[in-house]
Amino acid sequence: SKRAGGFECEFVEPPPKFFKVECCICHLILREPYQAVCCGKRFCDNCLEDIREVDAPCPHCRDPDFCDYTDKGHQQTLYEFRVYCTHKSKGCEWTGELRELDNHLNSDPPADKSLQGCPYTLINCPLSCAGCEKGVCRKDVKSHVNDNLLGHVMMQNAQMRSFEQQLQECHSQLQEHRSIITELKAQLEEGKRDK
């Protein structure tokens, strides 16, 4: 799934002034940069999605014949700059190349990797499948699960009851379909005998 806008972080050492790093739409660090043919300005790929869909003019110079292209060279250089974690102000000490930031944050992890990544990233409770809707900092997941053990067990129990009810409904629908099929087979046999 695509993220909206650019990267929110700061550089360990700022890039040279002539090297443009900011999207002209979201004003964050460019993510998958595209360059406008008309004015040369750069934008995040996903910031341009709505503009491309409706054939809007250039978001910067308003050229009605807006056309853009992927700027892989710019991206390659940009993604090599070292950055601090987005959560530096909260205490994360990670630094790495910009290309590694999303993996470090691991903001939308699969269940088996929910505890891997930045300890300050807000993630869904690992028991969201049971109905817990809390967002929790990765570093606080264990205490959240322990502190809400009874609530989580009750949610899972309610979900199990719901599944059992759905299963019973499916079973009775299956029985109905079987009796309809049996009836149709009988009518078909009767129709063959009448010929």
Image: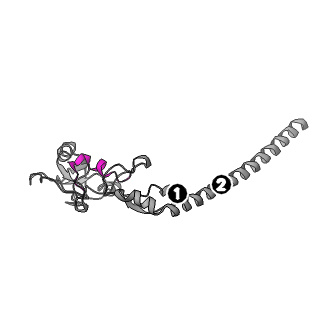
Whether residue 192 sits left or right of residue 47 in the image: it is right
The residue drawn where x is 39% and y is 47% is: 113
Judging from the image, what secondary structure is the residue with disc 2 in?
helix
Whether residue 3 sits left or right of residue 81 in the image: it is right
- Looking at the rendering, in which quadrant would you find the C terminus? top right
Is the residue 149 above or below the residue 188 in the image?
Answer: below
**Residue closest to the eye, 2 or 159:** 159
Q: Quadrant of residue 73?
A: top left
Reading the image, the residue beneath label 2 is 164
Residue 46 placed where, x, y %?
31, 53
Q: How many marks?
A: 2
**Residue 170 is one of the magenta-drawn residues:** no
Judging from the image, what secondary structure is the residue with disc 1 in?
helix
Colouring mode (rainbow / by chain / secondary structure / one colour): one colour
The residue drawn where x is 35% and y is 48% is: 116
> Does the image show residue 195?
no
**Disc 1 crowd, CA 10 A, few/some/many (<14, 14-19, 20+):** some
Report if the CB atoms under discs 1 and 2 are less than 8 Å apart: no
**Disc 2 crowd, CA 10 A, few/some/many (<14, 14-19, 20+):** few
What residue span does the magenta drawing correspond to?
A: 92-108
Residue 189 placed where, x, y %?
85, 38
Disc 1 residue type? Ala
Disc 2 residue type? Glu
Residue 147 placed where, x, y %?
45, 63
- Residue 130, numbered circle: 1
Is the residue 193 above or below the residue 95 in the image?
Answer: above
Earlier residue among tags 1 and 2: 1
Whether residue 23 sits left or right of residue 138 in the image: it is left
